[in-house]
Amino acid sequence: MAIKLHFTRDSFNVFKNRGVVKGTREAFYARNDRYMFERLARKYPADKDLIQFFVANFAYGNESAVYSGEESDSTYLEWLKRKQSITKVFTDDLNTVLMDAYKKKLKEDAIINFTSNEYPTILNLYLGKQIGIETVSILNSINSMVTQWKDNDAVVLLWENEIRRIEKVTGFIKYDSSRLMPIYQSFKEEIKEL
């Protein structure tokens, strides 16, 4: 319940609330779908694995992970794979951003910020599933670009859930900044040369 609230409500933060939500065993046993939750608990007996299962599915937009079986399992495995190779994922995604910027002859400002009512390249690539939420989240933790995106009413209206998802996944993406910052600095130098 805490993970779902975290990803679906702006006012709830699982890290600040320490995962505490109100609920009773009686309410759980009264649910028609409790057997699916029990099956998942047997499949992922360690709490951290079950939490990561739910985080993975919410992060990638599968809010019905309990009911989607094979799809939710493959989403979880993809999440684990990407987390284990976060440096490579980040590097590859930044290269995708650079290639798109070169191809479209974009200036530095257009990559991260709105320019003349155009979506930022990073947002377009993310929405087009060409770069992952992990990279967008890391970039946001470095330069708070989502705050600027939220100032645009069209983005909030059209992509409110995606913007929330980017913000909410941040605490679950762990990375070594000493490894990623040189990659990011190199990326910034390359986009300045555009």
Image: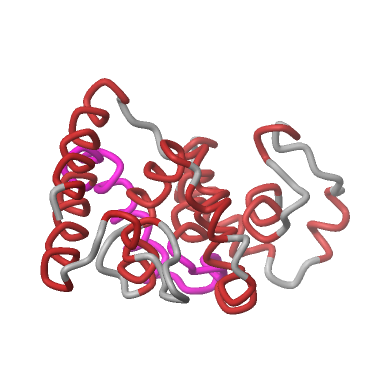
Position above or below: 84 against 118 = above
Residue 75 counted in the magenta span: yes
At a point 64% along the width and 77% down the height, the residue shown is 157
Q: Most extreme residue toward the top, as rendered? A: 178
Give the quarter of the image for residue 74. bottom left
Residue 87 in the figure: left or right of residue 176: left
Position above or below: 59 against 181 = below
- The C terminus appears in which quarter of the rendering? bottom left
Residue 114 in the figure: left or right of residue 165: left
Q: Position of residue 48 (x, y in %)?
A: 50, 35
Front one among 141 and 75: 141
Q: Position of residue 138 (x, y in %)?
A: 38, 42
Q: Predominant secondary structure in magenta?
A: helix
At a point 48% along the width and 39% down the height, the residue shown is 172
Total numbered circles = 0
Position above or below: 65 against 4 = below
Residue 49 in the figure: left or right of residue 77: right
At a point 68% along the width and 70% down the height, the residue shown is 33
Q: Position of residue 108 (x, y in %)?
A: 27, 54
Residue 63 counted in the magenta span: yes
Residue 105 in the figure: left or right of residue 86: left
Q: How is the image coloured?
A: secondary structure
Please state the extent of the stretch shown in magenta in the rendering.
Answer: 60-89
Q: Position of residue 163 (x, y in %)?
A: 55, 61
